[in-house]
Amino acid sequence: MDSKQQLYFPSSEVVEQANVQNYETLYKRSIEDREGFWAEQASLLEWYKPWDKVLDDSNKPFYKWFVGGQTNIVHNAIDCHLQGADCNKLAIIWESEGGETRSFSYYALNREVCQFANILTSMGIKKGDIVTIEYAADT
């Protein structure tokens, strides 16, 4: 290991609250019952319309997951946390390669997402358009 690299292990309190208590057991289940495992994981999200089929592998290698289902990842990741005290909870801690850090509550993250969406809209981007965002780090 490089002398500049350090390993940080989570506290016992963090481990106790983790969604994954036993990685090996979870991994084994995901292999042995792929569709059941992913249906269970997907059921933790809010769906506007539930899926008809977990996996359609009839046109390999073009797999389709959660066929017929409809959800919104922004709703599940941000919007559902905007009501009540959750809006002030920490959503993201960002750290740059240079060590600069920024923290975003769900409320602040929502504000940033909306601001960026408005920028795209002002540039003429519409629903269904493909957008590529290139990141150029200062070197």
Image: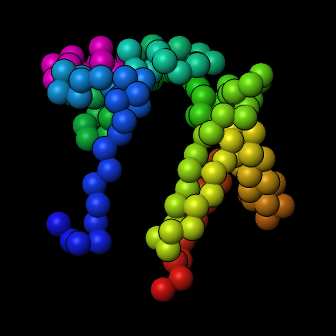
Does residue 35 show up magenta in the picture?
yes
Residue lying furthest bottom: 139
Tell me if residue 62 comes above or below residue 113 in the rendering. above
Q: Between residues 112 and 17, which one lies in front from this camera angle?
A: 17
Does the stretch in magenta take in 44? no
Q: Residue at x 58, y 19 (%)?
A: 46
Above or below for 6 versus 33: below
Q: Based on the displayed image, in which of its 4 quarters is residue 57 positioned? A: top left
* Residue 66: image location, x then y, percent: 43, 23
Outermost residue toward the right in this view: 122
Q: Left or right of 47: which side holds 34?
A: left
Query: Which residue is the extreme one toward the front?
Result: 12
Which residue appears at 32% of the width and 50% of the height?
8
| Identity of the residue drawn at 19% across and 21% down | 25
Rendering coords of residue 44 (x, y %) = 49, 18
Kindly report the secondary structure that dominates the magenta region of the rendered protein.
helix
The answer to whether residue 31 of the structure is visible from this angle is: no
Q: Which residue is drawn at 66% across and 34% down?
A: 89
Q: Quadrant of residue 28?
A: top left
The part of the chain drawn in magenta is 28-39
- In the rendered image, the vertical position of residue 131 relative to residue 85, given as above or below: below
